[in-house]
Amino acid sequence: MADMVRATRHHQADEADTDQLLFLDLDLSVLGASPTSYAAYCAAIRFEFGRVSDADHSRGRNRVLESFISREAIYRTPALRDAWENAARINI
């Protein structure tokens, strides 16, 4: 389990490790949530990092989101890709 949690840092896993791929996809589930839920999540993240300037927060957040949007697929498991990929790309 510790390895799975550590993998969330860069959201990369061995394609053969289906459990870890599922775990990482579930960690990104909020990206594919409804626009209202995603907006609430973004506000909560901003609050959590309130000590960070708006400019620094925007740069960091954009870097993270760009890393996901630049992938061929954000979600690595077929079922969750089918369920959330389009909504995640719209939200991002």
Image (tube, rainbow, N blue to C red):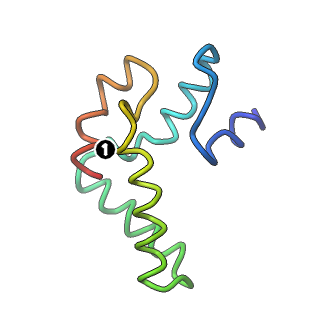
**Looking at the image, residue 67 lies above or below residue 79:** below
Q: Is residue 9 left or right of residue 81?
A: right
Residue ID for mark 1: 33
Quarter of the image containing the N terminus? Answer: top right
- Residue 15 at x, y percent in the picture: 58, 18
Residue farthest toward the top in the current orientation of the protein: 16
Under mark 1, the amino acid is Ala
- Residue 7 at x, y percent in the picture: 66, 39
Q: Between residues 16 and 40, which one lies in front from this camera angle? A: 16
Residue at 39% in and 46% down: 30
Q: Is residue 60 left or right of residue 32?
A: right
Query: Dot 1 lies on which element?
Result: loop
Tally of marks: 1
10 Å neighbourhood of mark 1: few (<14), some, or many (≥20)? some
Task: Choose top left, top right, bottom left or bottom right for residue 58.
Answer: bottom left
- Residue 19 at x, y percent in the picture: 62, 20
**Looking at the image, residue 81 lies above or below residue 68:** above
